[in-house]
Amino acid sequence: MSTFLLVHGAWHTGHAWDRVVPLLAGHRVLTPTLTGYGETAHLLTPETGVRTHSDDVVRLILDEDLHDVVLVGHSYAGLVISDAANQVPERISQLIYLDAMVPEDGETAADVMPQAKKAIDLALRSESGFRVPPPVDGFAGANGEGLFGVTDPDDLAWLSSMLSDQSVGALQQPVRLDNPATRAIPRAHIHCTDVPEDFDRRPVPSVQPNGSPAVVHELPTGHDCMITTPAEVARLLVGLARGRFQ
């Protein structure tokens, strides 16, 4: 049995994983909602950022006394799981970046994905001065349709019901990756390939920080793969956790 801690991306909640969790039966699975999203949207402040969310993850790991955690981050949560692993590397068995931002020490979301700079500027000039609303039609697939790669009307309605603003601080706060022990944690990357033609993904280095060859898998679906292809996501997570897919 593996322990999976699945961390949702920006604007989403832990419910984004609802279709994946049943497919991980026999494993321990935790899907927290990070501070400021969903049912905790009232806690969103200008100070809410990467550190807030990595602390959420670390607190859960310590409160539940979790060990050998397969820590999975989707999209923005690639920053979150990196910062969290830096705090408790001894508790983490593997980092899986699911169509996620992969930072270096000291980098922000805007460093990893320059498109975030536009969202930062808009948020700072907005009435609130810090809120970044969910996109209306962004992160579409290669055909330009849908939201986060989701096109089914029922799926879109469900997805839209869970989305809420995020703080500009999540895009501005740098990730800490200065703990040498973090470099020893094995990594894997899952890329969704149904993306717009102008999408610029940062290449994965051929060698992991621990010296092992890079592990990269692809899914022929849009960004929110946990909604569109949950069975394939679950299959990859279990296979990676068991060392079957290298």
Image (cartoon, grey):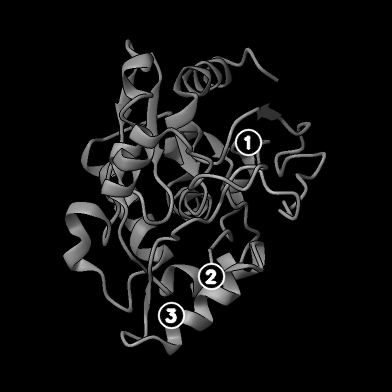
Q: Residues within 10 Å of mark 3 (few under 14, many from 20)?
A: some
Using the image as rendered, state which of residue 135 and residue 109 is in the foreground.
135
Measured in 3D between alpha carbons, the distance from the residue under mark 2 to the one under mark 1, in whole angstroms, is 25 Å
Q: Residues within 10 Å of mark 1 (few under 14, many from 20)?
A: many
Count of marks, rendered view: 3
- Residue located 53% across and 56% down the image: 138
Query: Is the C-beta separation of discs 3 and 2 under 8 Å?
Result: no
Examine the image and state in which quarter residue 123 appears: bottom left
Measured in 3D between alpha carbons, the distance from the residue under mark 1 to the one under mark 3, in whole angstroms, is 28 Å
Marker disc for residue 156: none
The residue beneath circle 1 is 192
Mark earlier in primary sequence (2, 1): 2
Quarter occupied by the N terminus: top left
Q: Amino acid at mark 2?
A: Pro
Quarter occupied by the C terminus: top right
Asked whether the viewer can see residue 101, the reply is yes
Q: Judge left or right: residue 186 versus residue 134.
A: right
Using the image as rendered, state which of residue 135 and residue 79 is in the foreground.
135
Asked whether the viewer can see residue 61, the reply is no
Residue 72, position as x, y percentages in the image: 47, 37
Q: Judge left or right: residue 240 versus residue 26.
A: right
The residue beneath circle 2 is 174
The residue beneath circle 3 is 123
